[in-house]
Amino acid sequence: MPPAASTPATATAVYVAAVPLRAPKGPGQLLMSAGYSLGLWDLQHFMVVLRPDPARTQALVFDFQPRDPEGVGAALAVLSRSEIPGVVRRRTLRRVPDRRCWLVGHCCDEDAVGAADRFSERWPTGLVVGEHDCRDYTNGLVEALTGEKRVLETLRSGGSTSISGAAPPWCKCLSLFLPFPAPFVLVAH
């Protein structure tokens, strides 16, 4: 009897998603919501979404954020660019988001989820906004899974026809009016 033909493994789809940053209630929260609604790139929290089985809608999301994103300590650390405790998270989604979510490639590794878990376990959790934050984590994990380097820069510049949501050209001008460096609030809902 001939050996059974093995079915080739389907590559895991890798996405990058953006959600509004969280901030303490009040003006900061209002500014974050407005910035996200306007598509301001620096006012978004980025994460990696994996869809291991194309036959199922379920997906996994991996991200890196402050341990207490709405705490006063997080806001002060952002303003001073000091290190705060961060946490790498893995959660299950019912489906891949249909807004502000971009297919960036496919993972060559047969165990994409395992590869993402191993990457996350090695990720240093001292978070410094602008130096070691959700953007660095997203870029690093996408590179580890797909080989694509600096994916967020590619998305921001609109380097792919399947990408939307890049910052409008006037986005850089907004930073001239802010009394602190953007991004100044850290994480997603």
Image: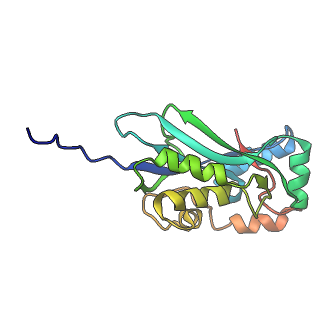
Q: Coloured how? A: rainbow
Q: Residue at x 46, y 60 (%)?
A: 146
Q: Quadrant of residue 180?
A: bottom right
Residue furthest left in the image: 1
Residue furthest top in the image: 94
Tell me if I can see residue 56 in this picture: yes
79 versus 74 height, above or below? below
Q: Is residue 154 left or right of residue 25?
A: left
Most foreground residue, 142 or 160: 142
Q: Residue at x 58, y 62 (%)?
A: 152
Q: Residue at x 71, y 51 (%)?
A: 35
Give residue 113's position: percent from left, percent from top: 50, 44
Give residue 5's position: percent from left, percent from top: 17, 43
Q: Is residue 84 left or right of residue 16?
A: right
Give residue 160's position: percent from left, percent from top: 45, 64
Most foreground residue, 99 or 74: 74
